[in-house]
Image (cartoon, helix red, strand yellow):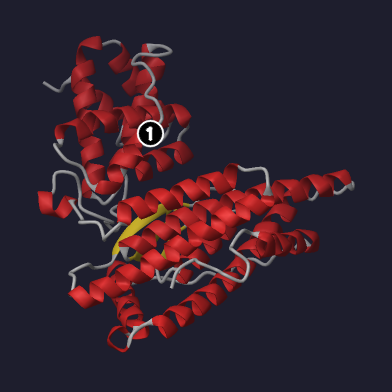
């Protein structure tokens, strides 16, 4: 005999529209004895997401976008329950789990509404596509879950994060610039030192990948900014506009730099855009949407040029300091080739998209000026080499 859950799933998960959800929710609401089994089935759907290449942050981000914040909380609850079965988790998972939204109490606001939201979530999870994995899944062999850090890496990254946090929190531009400059110099030296050390010791480090959410609105401009940061850090970025994220391929130290720098520059750009827009409104102009789009497009394009120039200068300075038996350019060229090959293996078919041009001159002008003011360290850029 078909169980209540099977009947509810048949009605809600394999048909389109709200009618099936209502039927399934009614069945579940009237059968509280199936709650434990329903939770177990939900964890199975989450486990299938891991098998298809998804990470906790990816799942929650998509659920929040396609459903709502309540569903994101339900997904977080299922994720937290499912991962308890693993003794160890991949490195990036722990930070993502720490950032999960709180799970709502079961059965709230009423059993029917709760069951309906849960079935909508299950239907979304059931239809998740297979995406490119960016690390070992939970439950993988111990050696696959652990990457030995480079010499001094944990302490260095802690210092960089602390400097950037202070730079974003201070109300004094000169102090913020000095802090950000120092952080970027540390990133640059750390990245170059690891590349040279790996070459000298013939380390077996290979490129990895991470995913960074690119959220609406103005996601095209945000994706362009992320691509610029990734390119400057010798990484490759591939944007999936349908699923709302960019996959960045590179060596681990460089991926850390991309994540930290992109977040900081996006915070700076958003704050500058808000201030510029306030000035526009004070002057009687109300082209908010086109102004913001043009602002961020100009900000991303200008920063891309600055980052590329900075990388070239830092590389030239590091090469001039390198000894004859540790020439830097061949080392970096080999790493660039490894990153390119890894990216092409992960994404054998990519397409380019024509970007719609900016239409607000004031927005473009203010965005360019904000990019020039972004705290990159003036004439001593330190993105990395």
- Left or right of residue 301: residue 336: left
**Which residue is located at x 44 percent, y 67 percent?**
188
Q: Is residue 126 above or below residue 336?
A: above
On-image quarter of the C terminus: bottom left
Task: Give the quadrant of residue 70.
Answer: top left
Q: Is residue 125 above or below residue 239?
A: above
Q: How many marks?
A: 1
Q: Nearer the viewer, residue 229 or 361?
A: 229
On-image quarter of the N terminus: top left
Q: Nearer the viewer, residue 106 or 363?
A: 363
- Coordinates of residue 41 in the picture (x, y in percent): 20, 29
Residue 190 visible within the image = yes
Task: Give the quadrant of residue 281.
Answer: top right
* Residue marked by disc 1: 100
**Which residue is located at x 37 percent, y 67 percent?**
191
**Which residue is located at x 89 percent, y 48 percent?**
283
Residue 219 visible within the image = no
- Coordinates of residue 113 in the picture (x, y in percent): 41, 18
Secondary structure beneath dot 1 equals: loop
């Amino acid at each position: 005999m078909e169980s209540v859950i099977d009947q509810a799933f048949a009605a809600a998960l394999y048909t389109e529209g709200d009618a099936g959800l209502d039927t399934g929710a009614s069945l579940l609401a009237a059968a509280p004895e199936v709650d434990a089994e329903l939770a177990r089935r939900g964890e199975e759907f989450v486990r299938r997401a891991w098998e298809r290449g998804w990470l906790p942050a990816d799942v929650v981000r998509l659920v929040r976008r396609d459903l709502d914040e309540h569903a994101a909380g339900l997904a977080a609850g299922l994720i937290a329950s499912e991962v308890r079965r693993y003794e160890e988790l991949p490195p990036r998972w722990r930070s993502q789990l720490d950032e999960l939204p709180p799970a709502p109490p079961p059965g709230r606001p009423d059993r029917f509404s709760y069951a309906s939201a849960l079935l909508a979530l299950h239907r979304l999870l059931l239809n998740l596509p297979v995406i490119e994995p960016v690390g070992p899944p939970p439950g993988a062999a111990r050696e696959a879950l652990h990457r030995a850090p480079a010499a001094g890496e944990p302490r260095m990254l802690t210092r960089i994060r602390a400097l950037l946090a202070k730079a974003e929190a201070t109300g004094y531009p000169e102090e913020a610039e000095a802090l950000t400059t120092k952080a970027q110099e540390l990133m640059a030296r750390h990245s170059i030192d690891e590349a040279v050390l790996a070459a000298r010791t013939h380390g077996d480090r290979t490129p990895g990948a991470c995913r960074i959410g690119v959220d609406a609105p103005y996601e095209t401009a945000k994706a362009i900014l992320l691509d610029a940061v990734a390119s400057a850090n010798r990484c490759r970025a591939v944007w999936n506009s349908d699923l709302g994220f960019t996959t960045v391929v590179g060596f681990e130290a460089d991926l850390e730099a991309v994540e930290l720098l992109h977040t900081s520059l996006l915070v700076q750009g958003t704050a500058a855009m808000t201030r510029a827009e306030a000035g526009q409104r004070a002057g009687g102009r109300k082209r908010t949407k086109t102004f913001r789009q043009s602002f961020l497009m100009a900000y991303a394009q200008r920063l891309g040029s600055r980052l590329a120039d900075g990388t070239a200068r830092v590389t030239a300075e590091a090469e001039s300091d390198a000894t004859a038996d540790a020439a830097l350019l061949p080392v970096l060229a080999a790493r660039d080739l490894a990153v390119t090959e890894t990216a092409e293996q992960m994404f054998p078919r990519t397409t380019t998209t024509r970007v719609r041009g900016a239409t607000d001159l004031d927005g473009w002008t203010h965005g360019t000026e904000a990019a020039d003011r972004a705290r990159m360290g003036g004439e001593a850029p330190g993105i990395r080499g």
